[in-house]
Image: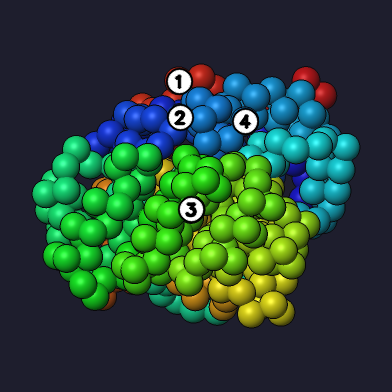
């Protein structure tokens, strides 16, 4: 396929409510939307680098720089026969910057799937037409407000509740939720807010039948997590520390976690995500799909990836309206009353981008054409 034109858009979308984590409070979400045109076919991708370097060192600005100055020039105007060929051209010399790479790769997958007339789920090896979904809830001002919020989400059907925790705002929330909802699937996400010396807190959490504890220690640590996991019944699941298949192997071989969280942005794209997924199948390690508060464009990719067979725990993939008043795709993503989400079956991402709404949330746009 001839890569005629690529467009980058810096978007900013207001969240329906502030998202509070151990990393800070987010009021709106900034990402980059990548559009690739090959003759009459258009591919869409979302780069999940945020406005701040609080979750990852990548930001909208660093990803824009890497896309504009390194990744896009390697493919613009070229004839590309597969996503793999494009990745070989763009990624080999650039170290790191996985979110930038993943955003471009997502747009390429959409383009190639559309050119073959098949869904993203199908081209990635998806095995189901519905996925189980959960919701990730920011830190609430009080236990009673959390209980109310969780109750509302349970009524909407969500199969699993994840709450954010930070030092001083942790065990009391877990205790209160367990008392109110003894049987729900419940997990916590610390976003690297603790140290190994906080082990007694996690031993106490062991008494509350949590599905998993997500990323309790350092955001690049694998070793200390192995020491903590050894002392706990509850599985640890690593998010921030896993950037690649190699990190996954190290974490599994060291016993640093028993469950892996996959976010295509964090690991550099769907190709690396599939390698991690397949390795975890061979090691009997369950995986689940994370989220980065994506718009419908990124969400479509997440849903497609989460339809692969070893995504055996509910993902952080919620309805569009849990994040934004108005999504930029149609139809927007919905959660069924049974806590599942339908996997789109139309070609590529399977949803239409509403250009009017996309324009409304675009703060900066740039186009790239062959020879310019
Ligand atoms: O740690 O999983 C995380 C959002 C932004 C950055 C990091 C994380 C999150 C979430 C939200 O938990 C998950 C979602 O998109 O629903
Ligand atoms: Mg996380």
Image: 258 above or below 194: below
Mark pair 1, 2: CA separation: 9 Å
- The residue indicated by pointer 3 is 199
- The residue indicated by pointer 1 is 363
Location of residue 117 (image quadrant): bottom right
Q: Is mark 2 within 8 Å of ligand 1?
A: no
Q: Position of residue 365 (x, y in %)?
A: 54, 22
Q: Who's the residue at 52% across and 62% down the image?
A: 236
Q: Earlier in the sequence, mark 3 or mark 2?
A: 2
Q: Of 35 and 185, which appears nearest the observer?
A: 185
Q: Position of residue 195 (x, y in %)?
A: 53, 43
Mark pair 3, 1: CA separation: 44 Å
Q: Of 79 and 27, which appears nearest the observer?
A: 27
Number of the label disc, if any, that sits on residue 139: none
Mark pair 2, 4: CA separation: 15 Å
Asked whether the residues under the numbered discs 1 and 2 touch, taking CB atoms below 8 Å apart as contact, a structural biologist would say yes
Horizontal side of residue 321 vs 114, given as left or right: left
Badge 1 marks a residue whose secondary structure is strand
- The residue indicated by pointer 2 is 30
Asked whether the residues under the numbered discs 4 and 3 touch, taking CB atoms below 8 Å apart as contact, a structural biologist would say no
Q: Who's the residue at 15% across and 60% down the image?
A: 151
Q: Earlier in the sequence, mark 4 or mark 3?
A: 4
Q: Earlier in the sequence, mark 3 or mark 1?
A: 3
Q: Earlier in the sequence, mark 2 or mark 4?
A: 2
Q: Image quadrant for the C terminus?
A: top right
Mark pair 3, 2: CA separation: 35 Å
- The residue indicated by pointer 4 is 57
Q: Position of residue 334 (x, y in %)?
A: 29, 60
Mark pair 4, 3: CA separation: 27 Å
């Amino acid at each position: 396929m001839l890569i005629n034109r690529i467009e980058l858009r810096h978007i900013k979308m207001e969240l329906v409510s502030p998202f509070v984590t151990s990393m800070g409070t987010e009021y709106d979400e900034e990402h980059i939307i990548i559009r690739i045109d090959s003759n009459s076919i258009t591919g869409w991708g979302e780069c999940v680098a945020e406005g701040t370097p609080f979750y990852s060192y990548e930001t909208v600005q660093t990803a824009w720089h890497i896309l504009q100055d390194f990744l896009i020039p390697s493919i613009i105007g070229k004839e590309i026969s597969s996503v793999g060929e494009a990745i070989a051209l763009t990624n080999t010399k650039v170290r790191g910057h996985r979110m930038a790479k993943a955003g471009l790769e997502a747009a390429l997958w959409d383009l190639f799937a559309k050119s073959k007339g098949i869904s993203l789920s199908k081209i990635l090896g998806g095995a189901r037409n519905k996925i189980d979904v959960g919701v990730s809830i920011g830190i609430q001002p009080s236990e009673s407000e959390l209980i109310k919020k969780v109750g509302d989400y349970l009524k909407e059907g969500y199969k699993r509740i994840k709450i954010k925790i930070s030092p001083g705002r942790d065990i009391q929330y877990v205790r209160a939720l367990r008392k109110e909802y003894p049987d729900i699937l419940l997990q916590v996400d610390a976003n690297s807010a603790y140290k190994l010396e906080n082990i007694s807190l996690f031993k106490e959490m062991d008494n509350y039948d949590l599905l998993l504890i997500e990323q309790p220690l350092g955001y690049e640590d694998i070793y200390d997590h192995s020491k903590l996991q050894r002392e706990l019944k509850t599985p640890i699941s690593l998010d921030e520390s896993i950037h690649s298949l190699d990190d996954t192997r190290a974490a599994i071989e060291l016993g640093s976690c028993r469950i892996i969280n996959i976010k295509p942005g964090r690991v550099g794209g769907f190709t690396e995500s599939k390698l991690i997924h397949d390795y975890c199948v061979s090691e009997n390690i369950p995986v689940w799909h994370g989220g980065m508060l994506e718009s419908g464009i990124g969400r479509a990719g997440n849903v497609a990836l989460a339809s692969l067979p070893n995504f055996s725990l509910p993902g952080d993939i919620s309805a569009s309206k849990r994040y934004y008043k108005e999504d930029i795709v149609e139809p927007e993503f919905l959660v069924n009353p049974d806590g599942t989400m339908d996997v789109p079956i139309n070609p590529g991402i399977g949803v239409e981008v509403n250009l009017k709404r996309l324009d409304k949330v675009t703060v900066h746009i740039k186009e790239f054409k062959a020879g310019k």
